[in-house]
Image (cartoon, rainbow, N blue to C red):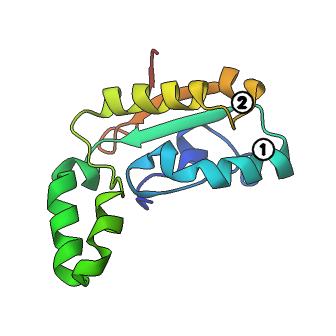
């Protein structure tokens, strides 16, 4: 979601060589529907999960966001708010590891894509990308 992150640049890819899905915090769990669509339409064999330094999700907690949303909506919707995972993050490497493990264990994701799943942390300041060993 962060416009400072341009995967085509740090993976040295040209326009159209990769499908990029962006979301807050890079949390793959929020992208399951889109992963299914990309697998079906483009038959991808690799999935790169990338989180980045200086990410906004490092600046809030689940309870903080949940409380803010509840302050804006009617009480009748609070149970729905309580079921949402907003993706607060305290450790980028652990978050990437958790996302890769989630992909590899999910029954709706193909074995081919599970095997081609890797995780990375992109450093906003240096422009370096580091592979996370899972």
Res 60 visible: no
* Front residue of 126 and 77: 77
- Does 28 sit above or below residue 41? above
Identify the secondary structure beneath mark 2: helix
* Front residue of 95 and 126: 95
Q: Which mark is residue 39?
A: 1
Crowd class of label 1 (few under 14; some 14 to 19; many from 20; radius 10 Å): some
Q: Kindly report the distance in space between the C-alpha atoms of the residues bearing marks 1 and 2.
A: 8 Å
Identify the secondary structure beneath mark 1: helix
Whichever of callouts 1 and 2 sits on the residue coming sooner in the sequence is: 1
61 on left or right of 95 = left
Which residue is located at x 47 percent, y 57 percent?
23
Query: Count of labels shown?
Result: 2
Across and down, in percent, residue 105 comes to 58, 25
29 on left or right of 72 = right
Which residue is located at x 26 percent, y 55 percent?
56
Which residue is located at x 72 percent, y 48 percent?
36
Res 89 visible: yes
Q: Which mark is residue 15?
A: none
Question: What residue did someone put label 2 on?
Answer: 113
- Does 53 sit above or below residue 15? above
- Does 3 sit above or below residue 109? below
- Does 60 sit above or below residue 48? below
Farthest residue in the top direction? 133
Which residue is located at x 27 percent, y 51 percent?
57
Across and down, in percent, residue 93 comes to 33, 27
Label 1–label 2 contact, CB within 8 A? yes
Across and down, in percent, residue 101 comes to 50, 24
Crowd class of label 2 (few under 14; some 14 to 19; many from 20; radius 10 Å): some
Q: Quadrant of residue 75?
A: bottom left
Quarter of the rendering occupied by the N terminus: bottom left
């Amino acid at each position: 979601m962060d416009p400072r992150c341009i995967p085509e640049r740090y993976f040295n890819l040209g326009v159209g060589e990769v499908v990029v899905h962006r979301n807050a915090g890079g949390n793959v769990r929020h992208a399951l529907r889109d992963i299914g669509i990309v697998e079906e339409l483009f038959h991808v064999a690799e999935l790169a999960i990338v989180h980045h330094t200086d990410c906004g999700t490092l600046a809030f907690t689940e309870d903080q966001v949940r409380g803010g949303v509840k302050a804006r909506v009617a009480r009748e919707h609070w149970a729905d708010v309580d079921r949402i995972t907003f993706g607060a993050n305290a450790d980028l490497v652990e978050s990437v590891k958790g996302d890769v493990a989630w992909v590899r264990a999910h029954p709706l994701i193909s074995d081919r894509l599970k095997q081609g799943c890797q995780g990375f942390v992109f450093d906003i300041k240096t422009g370096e990308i580091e592979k996370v060993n899972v």
